[in-house]
Amino acid sequence: MSGFTGRELIASRCAKFFKDGDFVNLGIGVPAMCVNYLPEGVELWLESEIGIVGCGPTPSWEDADPDLIDAGGHPASVITGGSVTDHCNSFAYIRGGHIDVAVLGTLQVDQEGNIANWTIPGKLVPGMGGAMDLCAGVKKIIVATDHCEKSGESKILKKCTLPLTGSRCVTDIVTERCYFEVTPEGLVLREIAPGYTVDDILACTEADVIVPDEIGVME
């Protein structure tokens, strides 16, 4: 057992999807934490749609280069062999299908693999950033999210009610309570976090859930 809980557990489980040498785009927040939990022997090429290929560790503001920031506006660094490019090339990597995996946060996700993560009607938002391009151009879209809203309402729905970022693009959903694989038949419960039961997951998930005979434990 890893002993991780909450958002650390989400990030560590998402990191298990990566293979050595993958070209990866990580969203802001929990997705960005995934690099702290890479399996042994796995090194990634991290792409930031703002124009960095080969993002390195996040430096302090005192050591930061003001010309290097990530998609969230935080200081960034570039690993040996990495490069800085313009937006045209950066989005060409995404739209051209060159990114292997993207990990995104969300407001809602549903059993059809739809994701809504860029706006709530009536609220001022900065825009969708590169999320729509990622949903359209990346082969594997992993959603890393809290299972429920602070109000207790499920974020894993039968059908998203907010404006969509991407349609039928999500391949996997990882929360602090479980891991779902998105299949043509619906959401399959693959793993459950320690301390939870199948009944717990079904009770806090609005979406229909397929429960297989064998279910793993999230680590």
Image: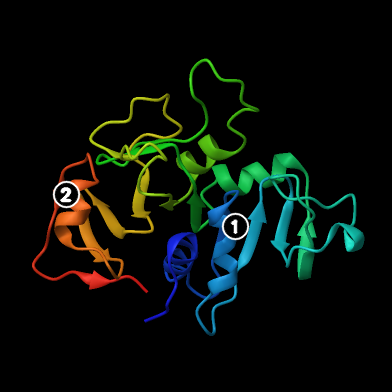
Image coords of residue 12 (percent x, y): 47, 69
Query: Which residue sits at x=49%, y=24%?
Result: 120
Query: Which residue sits at x=13%, y=71%?
Result: 214
Picture quarter with the C terminus: bottom left
Q: Mark 1 points at which residue?
A: 32
Which dot marks residue 209?
2
Which residue occupies the foreground of this view, 93 or 199? 199
Type of amino acid at the residue the image marks with label 1: Ala
Left or right of residue 116: residue 186? left
Q: How far apart are marks 2 and 1 (CA)?
A: 28 Å
Q: Name above or below for residue 182 compared with residue 213.
A: above
Type of amino acid at the residue the image marks with label 2: Val
Kindly check if marks 2 and 1 are in contact, taking CB atoms under 8 A apart as contact. no
Left or right of residue 101: residue 129? right
Mark before the other along the chain sequence, 2 or 1: 1
Which residue occupies the foreground of this view, 1 or 171? 1
Which residue occupies the foreground of this view, 22 or 196? 196
